[in-house]
Image (cartoon, helix red, strand yellow):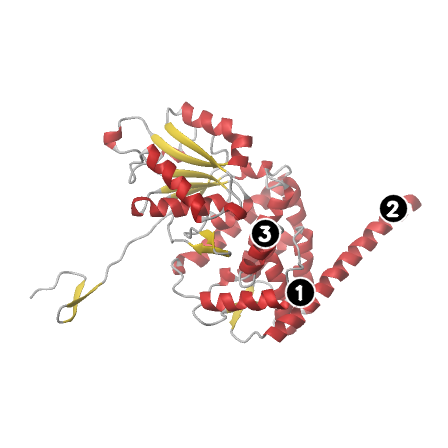
Amino acid sequence: MTQATGLLAHEAGSWLVRTQKEVSYEVRFRDELFRPDRTDLLEFGSAPWCGPRLRRFVVVDSNVDMLHGDMIRAYFEHHDVENAMVVVEANESVKDFAAAARIVEEMDRFGIARRREPVIVIGGGVLMDTVGLAASLYRRGTPFLRVPTTLIGLVDAGVGVKTGVNFNGHKNRLGTYAPAELTLLDRFFLSTIDERHISNGLAEILKIALIKNYDLFRVLEEHGPRLLDEKFQGRTPIGDEAAVAVLHAATRGMLEELQPNLWEVELERRVDYGHTFSPTIEMRALPHLLHGEAVCVDMALTTVIGWRRGLVTKQERDRVLAVMSALKLPTWDPMLHPEVLSQALQDTVRHRDGMQRLPLPVGIGGVTFVNDVTEEEIRIATAMQRRLHEARLGSQDQGAAAAPRLSAAS
């Protein structure tokens, strides 16, 4: 009997099927994406039987719609695109399967030609995760395009292939691997988000710096406050140069880590730095902590653990914590108590196939993985982390108190 290609006889009456699916997706920087002469969002065309007019199903974050809805609608009207624009409130507290199901209902009502009429999602990481899951489930996979409108969306949620929603008190417990056909990164949207959300995204950029790019760390160390103040808009020449350099370095760094291990077959992932304790901390602290803030608290803890193990010098530890503070990120949080951290580590071990595979920093720009972190070590490191945090706050208060005296003396 001749075997078909890829169909291997295993034993009598049993077959082993092996196949491969090539995956490719594009991440593209495009300033002023909704300028009338831009056509990036229209490149993926409609099915011939739908007629010559393009159709698009568009999901927009409610805050984005309030600020930019007129511009987005005018863009599709200018290009004569038939569209249904669904406006959705999106935050971690409503990031659940019911939200994804509601989007699927709207997609079905619009009547998407699933292979040639991509869903467009315009919003932050929460909305992109939710719409991505809905698109991956609808008719077993509908193409979608992403337009991130937050910094964390530009450098993290909009770069990879994971979708997901929270379930049963756990972050992203339901999800799929579903790459968007195209992600378009337009830093213009950052101009209208508040400083806290810029800071939130800077945490994920700092993560890339700490695990693999010392030069990126130095740029953040020197220009981080300027980027925070200018919101990556390049209001000054040096600010513009720094903004472009940081966004490109962070995006490239993330993609370099993801591409060879897109489906997470290898569980020792450098991009998991800051994501051992933070998922549990974030969900327990809602809405007190944003995602990047929880990640930063995790990175501060593991920086202290790394220092206690001799992987990080005192000078490096203090530089890292100083940059976190300069970026207006938390270096400690009341949620860091033994019971929560123990449960977080246990959940991570289940997620990482029975081992901690916990990333620890090696200096600034390097990482190693360990499997022997104990609850006692975490307790001691957390206490030290809190003392360092309080000492830094104390020095800042002293500096603020001293400033009026200096001013008066002058």
Image position of 80 with respect to 394: above or below: above
User: Image point 63% across, 51% down: which residue?
Assistant: 288
Residue 267: horizontal and vertical position, in percent?
43, 66
From the image, tell me which residue sits under label 1.
Answer: 317
User: Image point 39% across, 57% down: which residue?
Assistant: 262
The Cα atoms of the two marked residues, 1 and 2, are separated by: 31 Å
Q: Is residue 337 or residue 162 the one in the foreground?
A: 337
Residue 404 is labelled as 2
Kind of residue at disc 1? Arg
Q: Is residue 295 or residue 335 the one in the foreground?
A: 335
User: Image point 26% across, 27% down: which residue?
Assistant: 51
In the rendered structure, the answer to whether residue 396 lies left or right of residue 34 reads right
Q: Which dot, 2 or 3, sits closer to the camera?
A: 3
Kind of residue at disc 3? Leu
Image position of 56 with respect to 403: above or below: above
User: Image point 41% across, 53% down: which residue?
Assistant: 175
When asked about the image quadrant of residue 257, the answer is bottom left
From the image, tell me which residue sits under label 3.
Answer: 286
